[in-house]
Image (cartoon, rainbow, N blue to C red):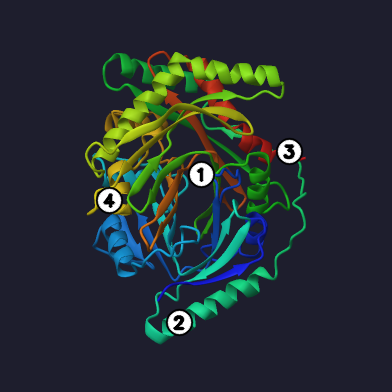
Amino acid sequence: MSPLFQEIAYLDPSVAFRAFADYPGAILLESAQKQPDFGRYSFLMADPWQILESKQGKTYLDDQEHNTSFFDLLQDQLNQYKSLHVDGFPPFQGGVAGYLGYEMGQFLETFSPAEHNELGMSDAWLGFYDALVAFDHQQNRAWIVSTGLPALNDAKSRRAQQRLEWLNKTLQTIDTAPFQKTWPSVDIESDVSQVDYCTAVQQVIDFIYAGDIYQANYSRRLRTELPLNVTAYDLYEQLSKVNPAPFAAYIQTKEGIIASASPERFLKLDQQSVETKPIKGTKRRSKDPVADQQAAEALLASEKDRAENVMIVDLMRNDLSRVCLPHSVKVPHLLALESYENVHHLVTTVVGALMPHHDAVDLLKATFPGGSITGAPKIRAMEIITALEKQARGPFYGAIGYIGFSGMMDTNIVIRTFVIQGKKVIFQVGGGIVADSDPQEEYDESTTKALGLIKALYSS
């Protein structure tokens, strides 16, 4: 049985999600910056029928521990509910969605994660969604999609109809008023001082000159509190407003809420076509058009930023080659300029053709965590990152997205992201360090990357 598709009136996904934000397992995957090539679709969902998690090295399905490894169990479950893709509709038509935290790399590469885990969240959290709302921003159309899973036969048809009606009814409760909430400013603290950050950057540079690595992505963590009478979803809406991004996301879990405005695609799988778009190279934008153009041109001409990007492109090409057909991994767009609300970025597009006997999970296992937030060589860079940062990254620098039961996948790199636990708000910023990096400039770049998040916190 194919999923049920019911077309509904098109509306803003972040407005529609207001009716679902407090539901267990509610997720919004939003193209808040709408681009025809990589910002076309958004999806919202809630109330998964089961949840797959990884906690402290153990795998759980609905809180029941399994001896099977996380990725093997994920693959088994996806195969159990495998379905055909229905053409003519958005690519996600039911499947798993959620996040893979950075520390999931310990199951794929030979490195030990940091012992200190401030956030205490699951290393991975994926909900299984049988029903969702899908938005096509290019056509200004929207649909409710309902599969009826995990039921079978006649019960499947009944469940599909019931879940479709539930989504439809819930959508009728939306508050469609424009988002205009303001709040007082907050105090933001960094866990690393400017001096200590620069010292750590210099240590990375010393590792590079010693021949250990070519590049590593070092970061620092900032923290504050939600302002009075401000909800986590209020903060997400403000973030989406001041820092729109093509791979934005909001995830509601028991251990914390993730509110992300990521500009970076990690992996897309469409049939057997693979795409990744690593970002390396950042310049702050200016409100003055001439100065803004000069900043863009300086970024395009920067030997340091170009070298930083090309190193990661080589790493991603090697990772993709593990699971892609020989000679299929190519770079159609090298060092392209992409401009966002607050920054310019250098972005490269790497594509490949997945081998017929591999699937989305195999692709993740070959490439996770992404090269742009680790370094090269990857394993040694990750060891150095752990030694310098001294705490588990958690969801930061992992991946958020979906894998459909039809095999389709789209995921981001978790940057420009808040983790909200009660009133506590945490975010993390950093950058790639190479041989000719300047410690003070790297600190300034990390501050530039925090601008969109800070603007959201300073709503007024």
Front disc: 4 or 3: 4
Residue positioned 68% across, 36% down in the render: 455
The residue that disc 2 covers is 157
Q: How far apart are the alpha carbons under marks 3 and 1?
A: 34 Å
Judge the density around disc 1: few (<14), some (14-19), many (≥20) Cα neighbours within 10 Å: few
Judge the density around disc 2: few (<14), some (14-19), many (≥20) Cα neighbours within 10 Å: some
x then y, percent, for residue 48: 47, 68
Q: How far apart are the alpha carbons under marks 4 and 1?
A: 23 Å
The residue that disc 3 covers is 185
Q: How far apart are the alpha carbons under marks 2 and 3?
A: 51 Å
The residue that disc 1 covers is 38
The residue that disc 4 covers is 362
Q: Amino acid at mark 4?
A: Asp
Does residue 344 appear to the left or right of 95 in the view shown? right
Residue 383 appears in the picture as rendered: no
Q: How far apart are the alpha carbons under marks 4 and 2?
A: 32 Å
Q: Tell me the SS state at disc 3.
A: loop
